[in-house]
């Protein structure tokens, strides 16, 4: 059951691909309203964990609860209305559509005009369509990319594409946002802007789960950090503690120092 | 710029004026042969709009649209001749059976790219082989002659200039449905899954559902076309399912520009006019379609629709100056 303040609870989540144990018995309790970091060396299972939480992969064992609701077996598209949104390490925007349309797609799961409404255009469907566009514009404004609304998403500079992907995720009205390496490939300036954006998103009451390689970002933003290594959680705690943790240092630098 | 239709009142007025003009065609064209060619264009249009929608908006592919046409043709004839009902339920049934097979093809939609193309091709071939060999029901290779013309009270749609009205009505419905779908929440979801299916799923879109919906729409109008076709020709035979027809329909889509309904009309009119002009070279038609497809894909990948809008963009400033 929901303990009141837990946004996301993973219990003994495992994922095997054939003989490979990508995740082994991962327990995770993400507190509501926190920025939670997920770090680990390459191949530690961070993206696999995101894919399991987001419904891209079904876990081989274990349960996942979102604000008390069991979402373990939900497919990706059904996890979104349950309050889960994500961005991708390799950006997955709708490149031929405009920036505005990308965010409008994000409103899909909160709106309802289907084929008949599209064809006959009753009043409520027209109002809904206007609401979709207005709230998408608001989000572009909120994230500072409103001037790009009419451009194809694929034509935006890299940093803005990452911001746009966040805008699209926010349009689904998530309660928890999974960001997979949001600052990858960004300039120093873009990274600082993004950190400020993430802080503003948290201020809206969202919980954020963050996979990130830039330690300045992780240490600067996160309330708590979980460390994965070979599919197992090896450490967890506030940033200062993690930096001192011997197991974490071993995982990153390798053993054999003694 | 956005997906909402711009300048709605002006566009609607232009569309209504266009339909009125089209409705006058049988009063102007007195030549029965030309009228028949125009009707056939309308019947192709119902199929081509569906395929251009599938390919350009949803990013799916089908070499089996003639399967839906043939199904619509045979099912509607089964209703008018087998059950002795009137044409109108048969027309609707033709569309619905096309739509139903659009759903049935759903499991195939997990396939992507050329594997999907092969599966849809197989679907049409199965239709052809069944109608060819199930002689006691379908008449086999001879087909079923003597299909009655549609009637409304005492009025019979028994000649091309009369039948034209039915085809025009269906084409108008077809354009309204598809263009409104494209500019809606549904169309947006379809374009999203075309651009990135994983991204679409992660944005809350049920990808399989909207793929099937696109096949249902395309299947419905192709089935409608088949029902009209069999009652215009007063005849059905297994040639309706022929692969060369699939290739022709695909060529029309490519020439017009995938995803554009205006392009669909341009593709149909261009290719069908060429087909009629060079009737004596019919045995080379597939080679000609292939050549045209290659040329368009090299020199104008957006098809005639893209050329048209490029020309419009160039002319717009001049037109603006002329107005002042």
Image (cartoon, coloured by chain):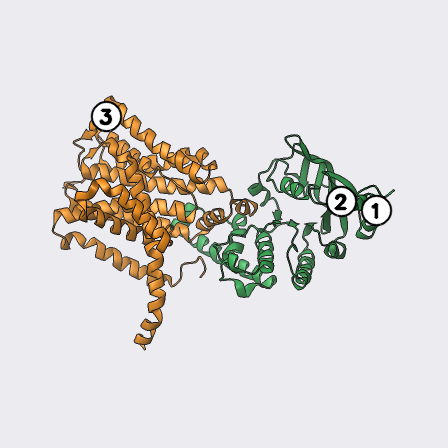
Chain colours: A green, B orange
Q: Nearer the viewer, mark 1 or mark 3?
A: 1
Along the line of sight, the residue nearer the viewer: B155 or A79? A79
Mark 1 residue element: loop
Circles 1 and 3: CB distance less than 8 Å?
A: no
Mark 2 residue element: strand
Q: What's the chain of the residue with tag 2?
A: A
Q: Which residue is under mark 3?
A: B140
Relative side of B205 to B10, left or right:
right
Residue furthest to the top in view is: B136
Mark 3 residue element: helix
Asked if residue B32 shows in the view, the reply is: yes
Q: What's the chain of the residue with tag 3?
A: B
Relative side of B246 to B208, left or right:
left
Relative side of A157 to A61, left or right:
left
Disc 1/disc 2 C-alpha distance (Å): 10 Å
Along the line of sight, the residue nearer the viewer: B137 or A245? A245
Image coords of residue B302 (percent x, y): 37, 54
Q: What's the chain of the residue with tag 1?
A: A
Along the line of sight, the residue nearer the viewer: A208 or A242? A242
Instruction: Of the two numbered discs 1 and 2 on the same chain, state the one appearing first in sequence.
Output: 2
Position of residue B46 relative to residue B129, above or below, is below
Determine which of the numbered discs, if any, sits on residue A245 in the image. Answer: 1
Image coords of residue B52 (percent x, y): 36, 47
Circles 1 and 2: CB distance less than 8 Å?
A: yes
Residue plotted at (82% across, 52% down): A240
Image coords of residue B318 (percent x, y): 33, 72
Image quadrant where one finds the N terminus of chain B: bottom left
Q: Which residue is under mark 2?
A: A227
Image coords of residue B130 (percent x, y): 30, 26
């Amino acid at each position: 059951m929901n303990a009141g303040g837990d946004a996301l609870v993973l219990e003994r989540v495992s994922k095997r691909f054939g003989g490979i144990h990508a995740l082994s018995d991962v327990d995770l309790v993400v507190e509501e309203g926190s920025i939670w970091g997920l770090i680990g060396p390459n191949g530690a299972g961070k993206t696999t964990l995101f894919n399991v939480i987001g419904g891209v992969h079904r876990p081989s064992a274990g349960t996942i609860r979102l604000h008390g609701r069991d979402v373990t077996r939900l497919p990706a598209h059904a996890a979104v209305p349950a309050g889960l949104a994500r961005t991708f390490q390799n950006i997955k925007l709708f490149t031929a559509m405009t920036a505005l349309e990308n965010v409008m797609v994000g409103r899909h799961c909160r709106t309802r005009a289907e084929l008949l409404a599209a064809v006959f255009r009753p009043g409520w469907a027209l109002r809904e369509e206007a609401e979709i566009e207005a709230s998408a514009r608001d989000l572009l404004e909120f994230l500072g990319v409103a001037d790009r609304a009419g451009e194809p998403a694929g034509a935006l500079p890299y940093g803005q594409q990452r911001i746009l992907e966040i805008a699209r995720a926010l349009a689904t009205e998530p309660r928890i946002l999974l960001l997979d390496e949001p600052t990858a490939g960004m300039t120093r300036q873009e990274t600082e802007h993004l950190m400020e954006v993430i802080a503003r998103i948290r201020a809206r009451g969202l919980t954020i789960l963050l996979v990130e390689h830039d330690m300045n970002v992780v240490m600067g933003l996160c309330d708590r950090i979980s460390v994965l290594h070979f599919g197992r959680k090896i450490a967890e705690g506030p940033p200062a503690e993690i930096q001192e943790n011997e197991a974490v240092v071993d995982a990153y630098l390798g053993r054999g120092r003694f | 710029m956005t997906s909402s239709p711009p300048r709605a009142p002006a566009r609607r007025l232009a569309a209504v004026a266009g339909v009125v003009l089209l409705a006058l065609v049988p009063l102007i064209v007195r030549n029965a042969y030309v009228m028949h060619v125009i009707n056939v264009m309308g019947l192709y249009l119902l199929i081509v709009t569906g395929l251009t929608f599938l390919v350009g908006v949803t990013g799916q592919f089908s070499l089996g649209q003639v399967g839906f046409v043939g199904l619509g043709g045979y099912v509607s004839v089964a209703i008018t001749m087998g059950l002795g009902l009137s044409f109108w339920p048969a027309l609707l049934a033709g569309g619905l059976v096309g739509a139903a097979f659009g759903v049935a093809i759903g499991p195939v939609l997990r396939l992507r790219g050329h594997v999907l193309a092969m599966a849809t091709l197989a679907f049409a071939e199965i239709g052809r082989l069944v109608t060819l060999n199930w002689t006691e029901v379908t008449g086999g290779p001879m087909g079923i002659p003597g299909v009655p013309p549609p009637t409304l009270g005492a009025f019979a749609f028994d000649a091309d200039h009369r039948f034209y009205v039915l085809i025009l009505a269906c084409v108008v419905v077809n354009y309204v449905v598809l263009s409104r779908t494209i500019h809606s929440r549904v169309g947006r979801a379809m374009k999203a899954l075309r651009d990135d299916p994983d991204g679409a799923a992660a944005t809350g879109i049920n990808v399989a559902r909207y793929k099937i919906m696109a096949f249902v729409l395309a299947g419905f109008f192709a089935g409608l076309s088949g029902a009209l076709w069999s009652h215009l020709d007063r005849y059905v035979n297994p040639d309706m399912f022929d692969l060369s027809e699939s290739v022709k329909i695909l060529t029309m889509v490519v020439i017009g520009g995938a995803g554009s309904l205006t392009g669909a009309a341009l593709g149909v009119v261009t290719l069908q006019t060429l087909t009629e002009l060079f009737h004596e070279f019919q045995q080379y038609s597939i080679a000609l379609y292939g050549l045209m497809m290659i040329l368009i894909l090299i020199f104008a990948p957006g098809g005639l629709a893209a050329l048209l809008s490029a020309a419009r963009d160039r002319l717009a400033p001049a037109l603006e100056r002329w107005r002042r």
